[in-house]
Image: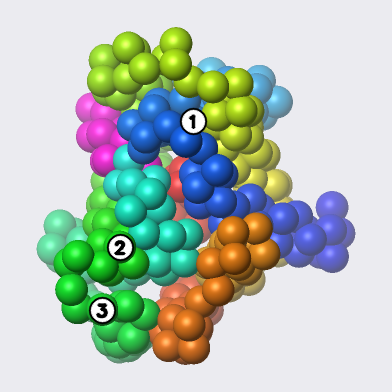
Amino acid sequence: MTKQTALIQMHIAAILFGVSGIFGNLIASDSFVISMGRSIFAIFAMTLLSLHFRYIPWRIPLKTFYTLVIAGILLAAHWVTFFYAIKVGNVAMATLGFACFPACVALFEMLFFKDKITNVEYCLLLCVSIGLIMVTPSFDLSNGGTLGLLWGIASGILYGASVVVNRYNLKSTTGVQICWWQCTVVLIILLPFTITSIPSISKMDWLWIACLGLLCTGLSYYLFISSLTAINAKTASIIIALEPVYAIFGAWILFSEQPSIRTIIGGVVIILAVAWAGLQKQTNNTTKPVIE
């Protein structure tokens, strides 16, 4: 694979990660149903990837299984809160709130691994905090945009926690195995809460849910990891940081969710901070990413 092809694939992966919020907005079902359905198609996609890469997804050490269950619970909570953020707010607020997760990873690594926070991470925490304050529509919890942002932040915190938990698994399992197990746990957890709703899911909802699982999970993940054979992880982290840009632009075009100048400036602060931090620090989590 050439570097140019890899860069194109990485941008496509970032777009697919970003449009997950757009699909979430198109689906009429609630966030529990969306997350459950996504896990079904994601498991199918990850099984195909396992066959492609000649992995046996369920063959993992017992110790790793326990941490993957915890990571799967966190992923389920992340998906549910993210899609709920879109339902109560909008794509821009949910996505920008979720974009705080790299700062959350730094905090969790300090708390659980006793890692020292570097100057780069201090700057990241400060810039993300400033950006989130700037994009807040109103400091009133009755405001839908504010609620969407708060739920988006909660989603980012949960995803950051899952990334840190998966730090235990990276040495003994592949990224595809991690994703396969996490999606399986998500399905097991959410199915009891959604099984009565399955007959009422419309055909269009199933179509968009399939797109979430197959395109925004399976295809995006495949493009991501295959691109890493030709470009380095720092370059990948910068491109993936553009995910909110693609999501907000898509929502603007499709749903007329025009962001305010304040939202744009705050979003730029967050995105630039995440991209700059990715340039300064390369982690194992980038080379073996966990599912979004």
Residue 244 among those drawn in magenta = no
- Amino acid type, residue under disc 2 in the picture: Gly
For the residues labelled 2 and 3, the Cα–Cα distance comes to 9 Å
Secondary structure of the residue carrying numbered label 1: helix
Label located before the other in sequence (1 or 3):
1
**Pointer 2: residues within 10 angstroms few (<14), some, or many (20+)?**
some
In the picture, measured across the screen, residue 2 lies left or right of residue 44, that is right
* Residue placed under numbered mark 2 in the picture: 144
- Amino acid type, residue under disc 3 in the picture: Ser
Residue in the image at 32% along x and 19% along y? 194
In the picture, measured across the screen, residue 100 lies left or right of residue 19, that is left
- Amino acid type, residue under disc 1 in the picture: Arg
For the residues labelled 2 and 1, the Cα–Cα distance comes to 25 Å
In the picture, measured across the screen, residue 253 lies left or right of residue 55, that is right
**Overall secondary structure of the magenta section:** helix
Q: Give the numbered dot on residue 138.
A: 3
* Residue placed under numbered mark 1 in the picture: 38
In the picture, measured across the screen, residue 4 lies left or right of residue 133, that is right
For the residues labelled 1 and 3, the Cα–Cα distance comes to 32 Å
Label located before the other in sequence (2 or 1):
1
Residue in the image at 38% along x and 49% along y? 87
Residue in the image at 33% along x and 53% along y? 88
- Pick whichever, 70 or 255, lies toward us: 255
Residue 70 among those drawn in magenta = yes
Q: Position of residue 114 (x, y in %)?
A: 15, 65
Label located before the other in sequence (2 or 3):
3
